[in-house]
Amino acid sequence: MGLLCFHCDEVIDGGVKELFRHFRSFSLIKGSCFGTLAICRQDGCQRTFRRGFSFKRHLIKQHRQENNYVVEPAPAGEVEDVEGEEDDPFEGAGDGGDDEDQDDDQDDWEEFRAEDLKERALMLVCKLKASSSVTQSTISTVVDDVSQLFEEAVGNLRESTRRLLRSQHVDMGQESIGRLMDQFEMLQKPFCGVETEYKQLQYLISSKNFITPVEKEITLGYAPRTDPLTGDVLQVPTPRVFHYVPIKQNIKAVVESRGFWDCVQEHTRSTDGALRDFQDGEHCLSHPVLHGDESLQIILYNDDIEMTNPLSPKAGTHKLGALYYTFKNVHPCHLSTLNHFYLAALYKSSDVAEFGFDVVLRPLVDDLKELEATGIEIDCQDKQGTVKVGLAQVIGDNLGIHSLFGFAMGFTANFPCRKCKIHRNEMRRALKVSGEQRTKENYQEDLRHQDLPATGVRTNCILNELQCFHVVTNYAPDVMHDLLEGVCALEVKLVLHQLISNGSFDLETLNARIMSYNYGFPDSSNKPCIYKWSSLVNADGSPGQNAAQMWALTRHIGVMIGDLVTENDNYWELMLLLCDCMDIIFSPAISAGGCAFMGQLISDHHEVFLELFPDRHLKPKHHFMLYYPSAALKLGPLVNYWAMRFEAKHNFFRRLSHIICNFKNITKSMAYRHQMFQCYQMLSKQSFKEASCEIGPGSALLLNSLPDCDVLSELLGGYPLFADIFVAKWARVYGVIYRKGMMVARDLSVDGDPLYGEIREVVCLREAVHLILEKWETLYFKQHYHAYVVLPMDPCQVAVSTIDSLADYHPLHAVHSYAPGDDNYYISPRYKI
């Protein structure tokens, strides 16, 4: 019995080795990794794999017995002769045999060339360099030790082979023997030609897989250096530099990578009037460059990264600034992986503070000018021709954006808003958008005045030189910093402080609820931290939660403590009103009517806040929320522009800096290692959408062994009851994990309320993930808990849904409230569907 290839459905005889040789003939595997997720497909198994070794181990452990291949031990002194042995699909995968048939099969193996060995060795080096947890000295040690190991082991094997051949009186002058000895000599030096770091880098550059960061000089400075002879500290002239990754070369490499242009072609504009992404917004539709089907839209992100312990004496000394970018032409689901966020530049924050952003942005702006005017030539399987590239929006935290754009950096300035010219005192009470809006004309007039206190404009931004971008048309807000680390952090503490003060509950009860609440699988990694009384008293201090924790707390706080709060409590109503705003702000799809409703909710929220806390005023982040409705109309859902995933990219550099502990030229070290990470992705030939669906471990079962099998057979299109179906423990689709016990929105009612179902099983059928659901009934939406009241249907009803057919792809969790005698289940929504 042979093994089934997932790529071409061909049954491959000859065992695991032949199957993997078949994979390589189609370039499905590069080094030790598959270019796309490999599917087992043996005996109905649908588990997926990224690494070749894991796939081989799975085949041997899980599918050897299913082939009914049993070898009886041969009597002593006799040679085993097993009928049908050459059909054993696992021949050669384990210990191997010494029968004649196996020896004859060796002639079918492809010759292992020196270039193949060098490529495999280089893949190993690249994989180590791509890790942010390994130093260069460790990598060099691994290369040296592996080289020595191969030289000794293969050398010993060569000499043993030579002695054996001579003892058998074999003519050592035969051409075949010479080729064998050459193979031994080649294998003794796996890193031949790439022994050193310099040779490795030159080889990767010549292969065009490594985009070399370019060092750009800012100015000539002085750095202290210790004289190795006298010990004196000398001031040595040293250039102050930053590192820029050429965006033209990088974009060309990404666009020509496998699967990218397919993703671009699949991401089309909405036809039902809903706004789902940048291309549905007014800004894109009216833009002369970005609206075309043959243009690429990029989003630029700027932020600072603290490379050392923020509490150490070195805090701030080695702080770096990073410029990342990604593409808006692909569906947001593909941007869940950090592989699709690319580095544009790394610089020292202190250099920008002293010399400004212009010197850092100049090479980027020059390249973008060329890209939007003439474009780049693309030559790949899916696309041939010229593609223009334009800067769609720039995102980041408010301080970073104001610094980059040249607006007032202090939010207590007279005019702290980058969208309008409202005065600080008026802004603190404004419930709607008011004041003169910033335009290109009055922006130029403010630049001519050079009066920061009177205009709020500090300096010109070099990005204004671009044809398709201007700072006053940069509408993208960052809801993560504005809400989760701003308004929510403030108001949650204010409301909790008031509720504790008026006797609704005490701090110990609050913290006990936070710790004991049933967050379920979806929020298990984002459990909020407990509060200290000093933190609640100082509402303007540290939030006490990160952004993900704050979002989880704000969504679940209704069910968590709602039973302890009296109905119509004014402070609790403010909390619920904030949740209503967030339901729309974080929604992945929004209509024009939804934008108008969002604006009214935000205005009502601000009004209630000022009434309940008359001694306080609206923060600048409250004011920025007033522009969310217009921003959503122009750009689509605002959650597509938050900084959450970009900030996750910082972890690579933070971890690497703590490992290498070398800050002599920190921007070079970080930029080169990041580009090596991207180089490894390209060398492994991974598709742009390779992680779209990943199946976990499981087992192939007969459909009739599952409960309600008759109904399931009908729902699965008449699937045979006595056919195998693969039941997985979990499945990951576009980065979202689905597993048994989770709740999903399977449909919407006529009133627009979500209808939920509990995942009973995760099955894989015809290479698609299907969820077997137990239907639940949505009774109503309980505003006091800000949650849907749900119960399982009686009698039980089942449904089958694919991920694409769900009303919403995010799984949730159903919980009981803490109220005595309440048998209902509650589901706190992530957003309005």
Image (cartoon, grey):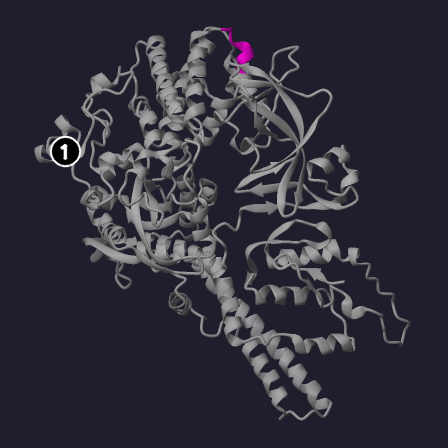
- Position of residue 516 measured from the top left corner of the image (x, y, whole percent): 59, 23
Residue in the picture at 76% in, 32% down: 708
In the image, residue 157 above or below residue 758: below
- Position of residue 670 measured from the top left corner of the image (x, y, whole percent): 37, 52
Is 564 colored magenta in this rendering?
Answer: yes
In the image, residue 595 above or below residue 7: above
* Residue 317 showing in the rendered view: no
Report the amino acid beneath label 1.
Glu
Residue in the picture at 91% in, 72% down: 75
Magenta span: 560-567
Closer to the camera in the image, 67 or 133: 67
Tally of marks = 1
Left or right of 334, for residue 727: right
Residue in the picture at 43% in, 48% down: 265
Quadrant assignment, res 63? bottom right
- Position of residue 820 measured from the top left corner of the image (x, y, whole percent): 64, 10
Residue in the picture at 77% in, 70% down: 86
Q: Which residue is mark 1?
A: 441
Quadrant assignment, res 273? top left
Is 191 colored magenta in this rendering?
Answer: no
Left or right of 55, for residue 119: left
Q: Residue furthest right?
A: 75
- Position of residue 592 measured from the top left corner of the image (x, y, whole percent): 37, 26
Closer to the camera in the image, 675 or 76: 675
* Residue 304 showing in the rendered view: yes
Q: Residue furthest left?
A: 449
Closer to the camera in the image, 56 or 639: 639
